[in-house]
Image (spheres, rainbow, N blue to C red):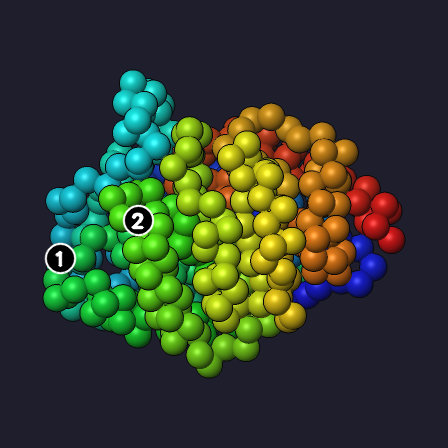
Amino acid sequence: MKTSTDRILTTHVGSLPRPDDLITLLHHKDQGESHDEAAFDACVARAVDDIVARQVTIGIDLVSDGEMSKISYATYLKDRLNGFDGTATETRAAADLLDYMDYARRLVQQGGTERSLQGPACDGPLSVRHEGPLRKDLANFQAAVADHHPGEGFLTASSPGVVSVFLQNQYYPDDDAYLDALAGILKPEYEAIVASGAVLQLDCPDLAMGRHIVHRKKSNAEFRAVAARHIEVLNAATANIPPEAMRIHLCWGNYQGPHHHDIPVSEILDLVYGARPHAIALEGANPRHEHEWEVFADHPLPDGKVVIPGVIDSTSNFIEHPKLVAQRIARYAGQVGRERVIAGSDCGFATFAERPAVDPEIAWAKLASLVEGAAMASDQLW
């Protein structure tokens, strides 16, 4: 994974706004409706090329494919694996929204969050249904990177733990068995991404958001035991991949909620340090977590790891001033060292393809401000 000794590099969390024609095709595919597969493949290939080109043009160093082929970062697996033909029967509402139900109803009506996180469920043994979608994702991204020459490319993949949050288990005897099955089935995908030349980003909202959704009735100590198990499984699934080829993303939920039940990062950071990936991406721009740069004073970043703090918010249509971005970067640099900070976003800008919280053009303006702020920070720090 690329780092720098003379300036602050820039990246983001993965998902970016999809073009309207692709959103329509993704919806048809997600709903099992008739669609032209060749037209879908061609549309995705164009979108990946365009999205990589635009990231390079505005100055993002470490780019992704924007998750162009995916309806969302977790539920895309139901179309690639056998075993997800069930429907969730369990309502998994966020604890913070349960405290403010009038607001929660309005947020759902506006498309600001998933409806109770209900959706597909695992109702049978997991196996690979189609290898083609992954091969196409890798080929599309390799072609775009070859054409546009970014500093580095990364691709996202769901962690076993976050799949267990979004895709309810109705088949395996317990959570441990489900996690082990997920790790075994996802392991080849992780290794294929790295073998293609991309850095692997493992999306792990389960380690943070999971606390106030699936495990909201547990104590923090009980949740830590769950998180430790999820990390153990993740480490097993990535055992053949060098840590330097991976990054991990923590998230408390990419929605405009009160978030007053979010577990503090100080309660889980020691566990996250035990995960194998080299880089840790975490929220650092929104009002609930911006102060947590201080945590690295009490929990020093281990040797061999870097941090990717969010310095622009992914749920607000405010465009952060570049000076504010630079200030946020400088705080983290003061704690962990300038060479160990890469500037990023809190989360993706299109976690669910059809309902981005941030207007697409504003998202790009925010990313441009990220680049400008990183340049300012670089001038100050070097």
Residue 148 placement: quadrant = bottom right
Q: Position of residue 31 (x, y in %)?
A: 24, 43
Q: Earlier in the sequence, mark 1 or mark 2?
A: 1
User: Of the numbered discs in the image, which one, if any, rests on residue 351?
Assistant: none
Rendering coords of residue 112 (x, y %): 38, 29
The residue under the point 80% across, 55% down is 7
Whether residue 349 sits left or right of residue 226 in the image: it is: right
* Residue labelled with disc 1: 170
Residue 30 lies, with reference to residue 107, above or below; the image says below
**Residue 27 rendering spot, x and y as whole percentages:** 32, 40
Question: Does 127 sit left or right of 149 as displayed?
Answer: left
Say which amino acid is labelled 1.
Answer: Gln
- Check disc 2: other Cα within 10 Å, few if <14, some if 14-19, many if 20+: few
Q: Residue at x 58, y 44 (%)?
A: 292
Label 2: which residue? 219
Whether residue 39 is visible: no
Q: Position of residue 322 (x, y in %)?
A: 74, 34
Local crowd size for mark 1, using a 10 Å CA cut-off: few (<14), some (14–19), many (≥20) = some
View extreme (bottom): residue: 240
What residue is at 26 percent from the left and 37 percent from the top? 93
Question: What whole-number distance in Å separates the C-alpha atoms at marks 1 and 2?
Answer: 25 Å
- Asked if residue 307 can be seen in this view, the reply is yes
SS class of the residue under badge 2?
Answer: loop
Q: Is residue 315 above or below residue 380?
A: above
Up/down of 59 relative to 141, above or below: above
Residue placed most toward the observer, 134 or 251: 251
Please tell me which residue lies in front, 254 or 362.
Answer: 254
> Which of label 1 and label 2 is nearer to you?
2
| 335 with respect to 45 (left or right) | right
Amino acid type, mark 2 = Ser
Please tell me which residue lies in front, 100 or 363. Answer: 100
Q: Give SS at disc 1.
A: loop
